Amino acid sequence: MKCAAFWGHDGKALADFYAAALGWEVTQTFGDTAAMISDGTTTYVFYTAESFKAPNWPEDELVFHLDLAFDDVEAARERLIGLGATKPAHQPGGKHWTVLLDPSGQPLCISAAR
């Protein structure tokens, strides 16, 4: 199983956002500070970090970000915004991808499934 870890102001809320975004489920919680989501092959763990500071994107370089692919990008964009994502003005992907900021302020890209 593959796993990646993310930090934010509220790990459980971030886990709920990505579980809904990906159609996965929260599979485990760790008190009030962390939660895990999975599709059975890939796992993401989200931690609460009180000193977390979102990158000032695009000025700050990103260590990493998620690229998510959807069959219907417009519907996914609207659904993700409804779940708490925001769409920044800076959109370097043109027609190839859309940048959103997750509820913790971290960029993610969405594009069409190929």
Image (cartoon, rainbow, N blue to C red):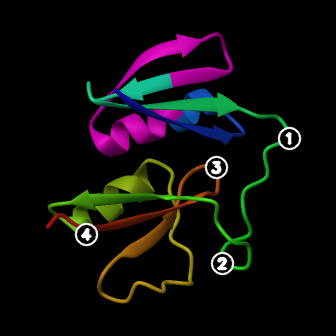
Q: Quadrant of residue 89?
A: bottom right
Span shown in magenta: 15-35
Disc 1, SS: loop
The residue that label 2 is drawn on is: 58
The residue that label 4 is drawn on is: 74
Q: CA distance from mark 4 to mark 2?
A: 23 Å
Structural crowding at the residue carrying mark 1, measured as other residues with C-alpha within 10 Å and reported as few (<14), some (14–19) or many (≥20): few
Q: Where residue 16 sits in the image (x, y, percent)?
A: 46, 32
Structural crowding at the residue carrying mark 2, measured as other residues with C-alpha within 10 Å and reported as few (<14), some (14–19) or many (≥20): few
Say left or right for 90 vs 24.
Answer: right
Q: Nearer the viewer, mark 4 or mark 2?
A: 2
Q: Who's the residue at 48% across and 66% down the image?
A: 100
Say left or right for 72 vs 110.
Answer: left
Q: Earlier along the polypeptide chain: callout 4 or callout 2? A: 2
The residue that label 1 is drawn on is: 51
Give the residue at the far front of this rendering.
1
Q: CA distance from mark 4 to mark 1?
A: 34 Å
User: Within the magenta stretch, is there residue 32?
Assistant: yes
Q: Earlier along the polypeptide chain: callout 2 or callout 3? A: 2
Structural crowding at the residue carrying mark 3, measured as other residues with C-alpha within 10 Å and reported as few (<14), some (14–19) or many (≥20): some
